[in-house]
Amino acid sequence: MRPAALGHDAERTGKLPLADAERRVLERLISAPSTTQALALRARIVLLGDQESTSEVARALKVSRNTVVKWRARFSTDGVGGLEDRPRAGRPVKTGDEFHRTILRVPLQLPPDSGWTTRRIAEALGASQTAVSRVRRHWFTDRTDLISRSVLNSSSLMVLAAVFVDPRVRVLVFHEPATPIAHLGTRKTSQFTEPVRVVLSAQFAYPETSATPEESSPTLLTKLGQVDDAVPSDRRITVLVDLPQPPEVHRWLYRHPRFSLYEVGHESWLAQLNSITEVLDPRQSSELFDLEYKVRQWAQQPTTPFSWVRVPPANAARRSSPGEHATEDDSARTTAPRLASAVVEALRESLASGAFRAGQRIAEKPLATRLGVSRGPIRDALNILAEDGLIELEPRRGAYVPIPARQDVFDTYTARGPLGALLFRRVATNGTSRLTAVKAALDDIVEHARIRDIPGAGDADIRWQDTVAAAADMPRIEKMFFRLSLQLRMFVSILGLDYAYSVDEIVADNTAIFDALQSQDPDEVTRLWRRKIDNAVAYMVEQLGHLDVTPRGE
């Protein structure tokens, strides 16, 4: 219930002042795809009433003054809950917790072709559609004190990294993606509503149980350890749980500072629907739809806890612990990662060599046919490439080649410079035993220069830099550098640029760097690397002026 003073103020001024939290909840309610038109209109009435009088709101929304007065009064008394329909005389409506659980359990079943709409749920249960709608709004509507609303920042993206469900505790794990997404403000995640709804409702696969913090500790500690192993060490991890946790869990968190755990509260667990869908990375779409399917399959016979961890493909063959729900069929565990890895390599080379046009859609079925694999490895590969920043994934549109802007090229070099300096400097202090491959890659550049193969020399130069990075024995930083190399090769191909600032200068620069590496002079290596990057950037700048694509932020 809202404070009575606000209601008195509304009567005096003809306006209904709103707190910031109330305004955010109303805005969310209006934009949420699950909100009915009637409920959205009522929310607009209240939201507009913050600045306008009753008559002005009625004229703006083309409703009667009585309608405005009615819903503003309901909101003033009961908050957002007052905007819902109240029971009417006539057909009796079933009530009680078990009826709610029955409605909330339905999405866990395989849906009809049209999906689990409120009408389809009502038909399946022999209930009224109004009753079904009311129950779903009650549980899935945002609450003003919702923790995930403040924890999951809607201005940035998050990847759903793990889901755990057992009779004692529910856990969702998130971390930031490896690479940011272009055009953040235009992403659309409304299609994630049903997958997230299914994940949040997974608890209803079990009979109603009660749990205490002491009971949830062993399960949660095991799961957090699995997440710690699966998520790269440079990512911060956000964990949402629905029950207070005992001291053992908090001691574990103290020893693992990159984890932040938030207790959402059992009553607010389902209300996270919209706050989660808003922040999910669209490039994870195929994984989320696959997760939706896995939850439904598990819910048919939930004899063991549901456990899903998003792991890198190289680790996907690792079997889950006994008693846990497997994330992939046993028969596909060992073959799927290898297939996905092969597909990734093939697509990386195609993208880097200019086999795809900027903005071109990458259709899964033709690609699967051409490579002789199923669509599963194709989807896995596309997700990996999206994290590398080589493609973009959007609901409905699917995978497509991005259209690079000038800023993309500048950003790549901005990141590549310091990473390269760190890697090259490390090679200069590791001894000369790892320089054989570096010398062979340098000889390859010299040969391309001798026959005046300018494009080949440019490509060989990038490969030479990757070879030096591999000799640094810093796998995580090398991986970041390699991603930037792929992006650079793709930009050069798609934008029709000449990477090679001068074949002769490339040979001179790289020879000087190699000599400094052999001399084990890290300061000279760093100076020469920075000069090389400056030369490359200066040459690229001359070519980028003709682009008609405006970089983000300009």
Image (cartoon, rainbow, N blue to C red):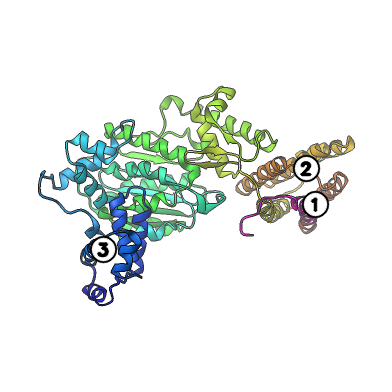
Residue under label 2: 461
Find the magenta span and give its range.
Answer: 531-554
Frontmost residue, 8 versus 99? 8
Disc 2: CA contacts within 10 A as few (<14), some (14-19) or many (>=20): many
Residue at which label 3 appears: 68
Secondary structure state at the residue bearing disc 1: helix
Q: Quadrant of residue 494?
A: top right
Counting residues from the start of the chain, the first of labels 3 and 1 encountered is 3
Q: CA distance from mark 3 to mark 2?
A: 69 Å
Which-is-in-front pick, marks 3 and 1? 3
Kindly indicate the quadrant of the structure image that contains residue 250.
Answer: bottom left
Image quarter where the C terminus lies is bottom right
Give the percent coordinates (x, y) of residue 217.
Answer: 30, 51
Please identify, in this view, whether the residue under mark 1 or under mark 2 is nearer the observer. 1
Q: Is residue 375 left or right of residue 270?
A: right
Residue 241: image x %, image y %?
A: 33, 52
Identify the residue at horizontal 36%, vertical 40% (top origin).
307
What is the C-alpha distance between the residues marked 3 and 1? 64 Å
Residue 460 visible in this rendered orientation of the protein: yes
Determine whether, in the image, residue 404 is placed left or right of residue 42. right
* Relative to 119, 552 lies left or right: right
Mark 1 touching mark 2, by CB under 8 A? no
The spot of residue 281 in percent (x, y) is: 48, 47
Residue found at x 25% / y 49%: 215
Label 1, on which residue? 539
Is 132 contained in the magenta span?
no
The magenta stretch spans residue 546: yes
- Nearer-N-terminus badge (1/2): 2
| Amino acid type of the residue tagged 3 in the rendering | Val
